[in-house]
Image (cartoon, grey):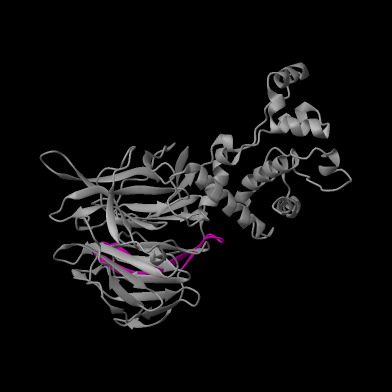
Amino acid sequence: MHHWVQASSSDFSGTPPQPRSGHTAVNVGKSMVVVFGGLVDKKFLNDLIVYDIDNKLWFEPECTGSVSEGQVGPSPRAFHVAITIDCHIFIFGGRSGGKRLGDFWVLDTDIWQWSELTSFGDLPTPRDFAAAAAIGNQKIVLCGGWDGKKWLSDVYVMDTMSLEWMELSVSGSLPPPRCGHTATMVEKRLLVFGGRGGGGPIMGDLWALKGLIDEELETPGWTQLKLPGQAPSSRCGHTVTSGGHYLLLFGGHGTGGWLTRYDVYYNDTIILDRVTAQWKHLPISNEPPPPRAYHTMTCIGARHLLIGGFDGKLTFGDLWWLVLEAKRSYVPQVRNPPEIKESERELDKEKGQEGSAFVELQKKMGISVPSVLRLQIPEESEDQEFIELGTRLIEGDMIDDQTSMIQIAAQAIRQHWKESTPITLQLKELGSLLRDYQRLVTRKYTAQSSLTSTDFGLPGTKSFTFYHIKSSSELRIDDIPKLLEEYKTLLI
């Protein structure tokens, strides 16, 4: 089950962003979230507020660089796009008052320097309510928007090294023109959902664009996707963020009523599961934030941070965390509580436990049944916390085969831990690391006929000190370097 938590001033140091909508908030690596611009009470903003994730600190950096309208950096705006490439944030377009903008800026977050870029090629026309995404670590794709006169369906790709724009020539059927939609790069495809279309209708269609990856040599083309499950209602001004093996959609603006159309603002949370390729409503254990659109949602580890938004009357300045809780089954559990008699444990053993890897291990080691059967170590496919950590590290294609997805995610997180040090290892990873350590010990040594108790912490060959620990909460701080050291020997 998942739940919403409203942030309070005691959760942070510094001053968080003031109320706003139509702003952008992007991750820079794993250390920062950078908020820029937006709109409140008809006032357009160009302030820059940074959240230091590690120190839970909001601050406003002192920026240098190009001057626009007497100020360093872009002029005030809302409904623009912002894309991160490494330590650089690229800003394009938006609106200020009744004027649509077409200027292009980059912020170097290493030195907090703004530069207005002079790009060339097929330059996109000024627009607001467009959508954009990063293609790998070098290019940006921009699609749709509103230029003040018409809704757009064009697609542009910009190379951030050469600063050249290219309008993509797309064959076949095209999505209807739209603005206020989302565009999310999922491996080799750009997924576009929703938006307000030509003539004003609000849409709930999902499209995939191929042909954006040079190495694939694919002809660019759109495909409309009609996925099973509980699909979101038609909307614009929503957000879609990536959270491991799923995409998370929140909020947005739609219309209700059959005869008299009226505005509807949403606060539902829907996920697109990339493994099963279907929509699902995310179960929430408490009341969600008030409905809103033109907010931002940013993924920070296993949580999502909601900032601002607008509900037709009120511009929000609240901050919310969506906390994705691990299921109880992810944690190693006691199979036989202490009050169960020894005879009952032996009976359980006789009823089919002999075939398990754990009992086989017990036989080879000469350890009594109860000490081994206390642990029920899940396999990779059942350890969803372990898999979610891995999926956040991979950048492969959308994988329909769940087995392949699990294998790739497992390889990614194990490689991450192989390269980790006790200082870089995060506390939230310890539970998954301990369970995988126990999995690998079991898998590696139950296949050996010569295994003895010397392999498990007694004088002898190898030492696997933490095999019988039931939970990472039992670990002390000074255990972590030893656990990581022993884990790495299992990967050799």
Q: At x 26% / y 46%, what residue is drawn? A: 265
Q: At x 30% / y 74%, what residue is drawn? A: 165
Asked if 138 appears above or below 358 in the picture, the reply is below
Please tell me in which quadrant of the rendered image residue 214 appears: bottom left
Q: Horizontal placement of 448 versus 253: left or right?
A: right
Magenta stretch prevailing secondary structure: strand
Instruction: Check the image and name the residue furthest to the left.
Output: 259
Residue 248 x, y percent position in the rendering:
39, 48
Magenta stretch: give its range: 37-59
Instruction: Check the image and name the residue furthest to the right.
Output: 459
Residue 216 x, y percent position in the rendering:
40, 62
Please tell me in which quadrant of the rendered image residue 116 appears: bottom left
Q: Is residue 79 visible?
A: no
Judge by depth and name the residue closer to the eye, 352 or 322.
352
Residue 261 x, y percent position in the rendering:
14, 44
Asked if 401 appears above or below 49 in the picture, the reply is above
Residue 158 x, y percent position in the rendering:
34, 72
**How many numbered circles does the render carry?**
0
Residue 44 included in the magenta stretch of the image: yes
Asked if 486 appears above or below 140 in the picture, the reply is above
Q: Is residue 80 visible?
A: yes
Judge by depth and name the residue closer to the eye, 338 or 215.
215
Q: Quadrant location of the C terminus?
A: bottom right
Q: At x 39% / y 69%, what residue is drawn? A: 139
Q: Horizontal placement of 269 versus 223: left or right?
A: right
Asked if 92 appears above or below 268 in the picture, the reply is below
Judge by depth and name the residue closer to the eye, 456 or 36.
456
